[in-house]
Amino acid sequence: MSLLMDQSAEELECGMDNPVLPFLRKDRIPHIWCPGCGIGTTVNSFCRALGDSGMDLDKIAIVSGIGCTGRTAGYLNLDSFHTTHGRAIPFATGLKLANPDLKVVVYSGDGDLTAIGGNHFMHAARRNMDIMVVCINNFTYGMTGGQVAPTTPLGPTQTTMPFGNFESSFNLPFLADACGAVYVARWTVYHVRQLAKAMKEGLQKKGFVFIEAMAPCPTLYSRRNRLGDGVDQVKYFKERSTIKNGVDTKDVGLTYQGDIVVGKFVDRDRPTWMDSMNDHFGKVLGDKYETYGAHHG
Amino acid sequence: MSDDQQRKGRGTVFVKEEVCKGCSYCIDFCPTHALEFAREFNAKGYHYPVLGRPDDCTGCDNCGLYCPDFAIYGARWKDIDEKKKAK
Ligand code: SF4
Ligand code: SF4
């Protein structure tokens, strides 16, 4: 069967192919995301990170929850699991603990990770579970129809906030930092190279990694609020972003169409949950205890 | 794109026209503004990008990094020739 993503005659002639294709399930493209949606661009960056990391793709698993971003697990050419709403992190935790050799990546949206899955997020960060969490933040619930999210800034209208949102929003990097994440970064869909680099660093980092990627939702956020199309939001990201690596995360909160701080905010080390468990049982039980997942933490 | 055609610029792009959703990311973020929308559209009704100013394409693949639909990528002639030779 021929696929839309198959090499064209022109490509076959010179042996060229899109460099991201080895990381995608070619038969599932085109994906379901709207024209101008930024999620695809973040997946593009993730494919570059997978390639640049040089890691064995059989040793990486990807887990996502429900939502537009939740579809990502189904498009990547990795072992993947599409969990129930908000439960990507607990599933990933189990996967990691049962298979300490795996690098487990959670790839999901702001609503899934920090609203319904908020509790799991906090506790995985607190325990320093060795997983990488990529949160695509588009400030709304896309798949279910544009309801207000814990990341929606004050001001814009949403289907459940017809007169504009009056609820305070989360500052996600601050939340992750306060809960104990060892690596915290924020980039936008405009910052494709930096995002790919952060994802590569995240893949190689041990402990709870949190990367926020701001993305436009043209269908239910931008156009609804007369902010133009997806590309106009990306231009806003370009114009209003300042890179401030290492800045205090309490100062990186977002406002409606206001200034954006991007960068790598936190990069530190502390024992992972498995390190702590091994360490503790080793002390308490002595020789009777056999270290679990010894070399992988 | 065959050798007998005269080459312009330092690179070129490969476009999967039928996968494109016409979002304009590639066009707006090409550092040299080498791309533009085609007058034609694909089966889904989206105008896809064409290399309107081939002289200006450097093959930097910035368009490829931005495309949310994996519908375009750029490459340098130098690398294309190497691939071709290796084939
Ligand atoms: S390869 Fe670079 S210069 Fe050529 S069209 Fe793409 S972004 Fe522009
Ligand atoms: S970025 Fe991709 S989907 Fe958007 S117009 Fe360009 S080729 Fe089409």
Image (cartoon, rainbow, N blue to C red):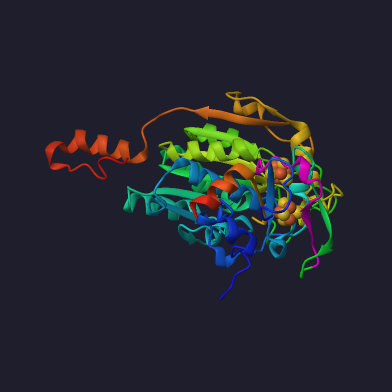
Residue B8, position in %: x, y? 74, 44
Residue depicted at 36% across the width and 40% down the height: A273
Quadrant of ligand 1: it is: top right
Quick one: quadrant of the C terminus of chain A?
top left
Magenta-tinted stretch: B45-61
Do we see residue A56 in this rendering? Answer: yes
Residue depicted at 38% across the width and 54% down the height: A58
> In the rendered image, which quarter is residue A169 located in?
top right
Q: Which one is in front, B43 or A34?
A: B43
Q: Is residue A35 left or right of residue A96?
A: right
Q: Is residue A239 above or below residue A33?
A: above
Outermost residue to the bottom: A1
Quick one: quadrant of the N terminus of chain A?
bottom right
Residue B86, position in %: x, y? 49, 51
Outermost residue to the left: A287
Do we see residue A165 in this rendering? Answer: no
Q: Is residue A78 above or below residue B57?
A: below
Residue A27, position in %: x, y? 56, 67
Residue A250, position in %: x, y? 63, 28
Magenta stretch: includes residue B72: no
Give the number of callouts. Answer: 0
Q: Which one is in front, B50 or A29?
A: B50
Residue depicted at 66% across the width and 30% down the height: A252
Q: Is residue A248 above or below residue A29?
A: above
Q: Which one is in front, B13 or A227?
A: B13
Magenta stretch: includes residue B56: yes
